[in-house]
Amino acid sequence: MEAPRDGDTACILIVDDHEDNIELLRARLESWGFATESAGDGEEALQRIEQSPPDLILLDVMMPKIDGIEVARRVKGNRSLPFIPIIMQTALDATENKVEGLEAGADDYITKPIDFAELKARVNSMLRIKRLQDALEERERQLLEANERLRHMSQTDALTGLDNRRYLEERIDEMFEHARRLNEPFACVMCDLDRFKSVNDTYGHQAGDAVLKQFARILRNEVREIDRVGRYGGEEFMLLLPGTVLDAAVTFAERVRKEVEGHTFTFDGTQICRTASFGVSAWPHPRIGNCDVLVRAADDALYVAKETGRNRVVRFDSDEFNEHLAADEGSDGSDRPRDVITTPRVADEGIRWER
């Protein structure tokens, strides 16, 4: 039940084991404009509160089965319930009885025989507090939702809905250290749509965006729940595969490559066919000392896949990878479309490359 607002009818649950008391209270409360429900014992009261939380509970202390003290304790201890003010009513006017009820969670107390003017004032006071409490909780909920949206935006690529580069770089550090700590394998796959620039040049940037989104959907559908997939930049994407050895990562990349090759991208009634190239690296490996080297190795394997014909999967320690880098060592690299690794040299921490 929603919190009462000005002009709304607040619902008050009357809990008393004497029917005459219930009817008397019901008549007064309804004459003041409140809606009422009733329960004849604590057990019935708890069931009603669980099913449909009232705006306020007028609770008798002395009852069979479950007394009012225990009802108050359970209601206030139930985190699934909203804030419900409890006014306890009793013929026991001793201070220790009031203290016991308040410590159990009661918000206010009224003694029998009830002074109805006092009751009306206490009910209105408690309902004002409830309105303030509910308004505060609603603002907190909205703030949490806003913070969650901001967090999601800061971690997500706006076009594809995948992880963005910054979030990927944060996760790979954590995932690599976790793998090293547990001595579990960890693989990185870099992939890139082939001849993507021609999509923008031929069909326009909206078509290019549509192709990227569809490519992202293929990647998302192929990875496991524990994997991370994100847009690393432009038409280049990164996939992080925990618990995956190099051979398995190559097999995975080959499966995705075939999926892309057999897929027809569409935009505004136009069919567009493109392939993708993949570079794969993994740890543990004697040439991989840290996550930066892991990413560079996958990125350079991707470059080799592009240079050797596209629509291919290249692993960073394969013969063709090493042969291509060796052949490249004497070139000036002027034909390269981006800043790439040109000359390898071995260091203690793993592969080091001069760009």
Image: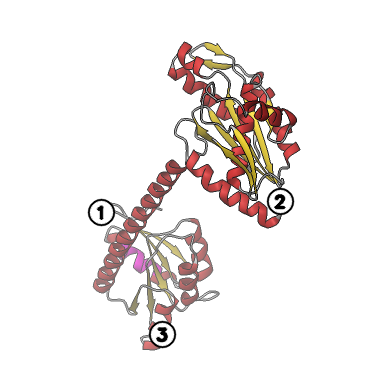
> Looking at this view, is 3 or 23 the one in front?
3
Horizontally, residue 175 falls left or right of residue 96, namely right
The residue identified by callout 2 is 184
Residue 278 x %, y %: 64, 29
Which quadrant would residue 127 be assigned to in this image?
Answer: bottom left
Residue 10, percent across and down? 33, 57
Labels 2 & 3 near each other (Cβ < 8 A): no
Tell me whether the residue at label 3 lies in contact with that at label 1, contact meaning CB atoms closer than 8 angstroms.
Answer: no
Does 94 sit left or right of 221 as displayed? Answer: left
Q: Neighbour class for label 2 at 10 Å: few (<14), some, many (≥20)?
A: some
Instruction: Quickly name the residue at label 1.
Output: 6
Secondary element at image label 2? loop
Q: Amino acid at mark 3?
A: Asn
Q: CA distance from mark 3 to mark 1?
A: 34 Å
Task: Tell which of 351 and 76 is nearer to you.
Answer: 351
Let me know if residue 351 is in the magenta part: no
Residue 172 lies, with reference to residue 269, above or below; the image says below
* Disc nearer the start of the sequence (1/2): 1
